[in-house]
Structure formats: C-alpha cells, structure tokens
Amino acid sequence: MAEEKTELDKRFEEAVKRASKTDLLFPPDIRLYFYAYYKRARGNHSEKTHDEDVDGSALINAFKMNAIFQVRNISIDEAKQKYIELVDEQIPK
C-alpha cells in the first residue's frame, strides 16, 4: 500500500521541480544550502567522498560534507520546510 503524500511532501516536490528548472546562478553558499537541505529531506545525509583530488573535487566534497554535517540534527520534515523556504526566497515564481 503506497503512502499518501502529505501537504509538506507535495510542496517539497513542487519546490524541487522549481529549483531544477531555474537558470539562475547562485553563490556557492546558497548552492550548499540547497544541497544539504535536499539531501537531508531525502533522508540521505551521508556522502561518499573520493580520495583523488581531480580539479579540486576533494575540496568540493569537503564543503558538501560540512554542509551535510550542519543539517544532520534537523528532522526530515524541517529540512523539507527549509528547502521550500530557500526556493521561495531565491527563485521568483
């Protein structure tokens, strides 16, 4: 039996669609918030990193890991809400 989506789930999915369709460019800190809230909202708050540093990828992975680390203690629902708020703030309707 499939779970019925909550209103929050529906709003989150709409926000994800809006974010994925935008052509706007965001500063790195905003992109990391998008990334961390999205990962936490999906329940995936661990990120595998590679040992190789190809074109700065180790540094990028470190920033991603730090972003995920900062949201590890918020609930999945709170991460969804924060993601929705970030989309509303950063991407005009």
Image: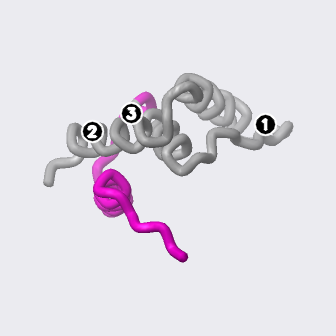
Q: How is the image coloured?
A: one colour
Q: Could you tell whether 69 is left or right of 79 in the image?
A: right
**Residue 39 visible at all:** yes
Image spot of residue 32 (x, y percent)? 48, 35
Find out whether the residues at labels 1 and 3 contact each other: C-beta distance under 8 Å.
no
Q: Is residue 6 left or right of residue 68?
A: left
Please name whichever residue, 3 or 93, is drawn nearer the observer in this view of the structure: 3
Disc 3 designates what residue?
30
The magenta stretch spans which residues? 1-29
Q: Which residue is mark 2?
A: 85
- Within 10 Å of disc 1 (Cα), the crowding (few <14, some 14-19, many 20+) is few
Examine the rendered structure and indicate whether residue 61 appears above or below residue 8: above
The residues tagged by marks 2 and 1 sit, at their Cα atoms, a distance apart of: 34 Å
Q: Residue at x 54, y 50 (%)?
A: 42
Three-letter amino acid code at the position of disc 1:
Asp
Instruction: Kindly identify the amino acid type of the residue bearing the numbered disc 2.
Output: Glu
Label 1, on which residue? 53
Q: Earlier in the sequence, mark 3 or mark 2?
A: 3
Residue drawn 51% across the image and 74% down it: 2
| Marks 2 & 1, CB-CB < 8 Å contact | no
Q: Position of residue 5 (x, y in %)?
A: 39, 63
Q: CA distance from mark 3 to mark 2?
A: 12 Å
Tell whether 28 sits left or right of 49. left
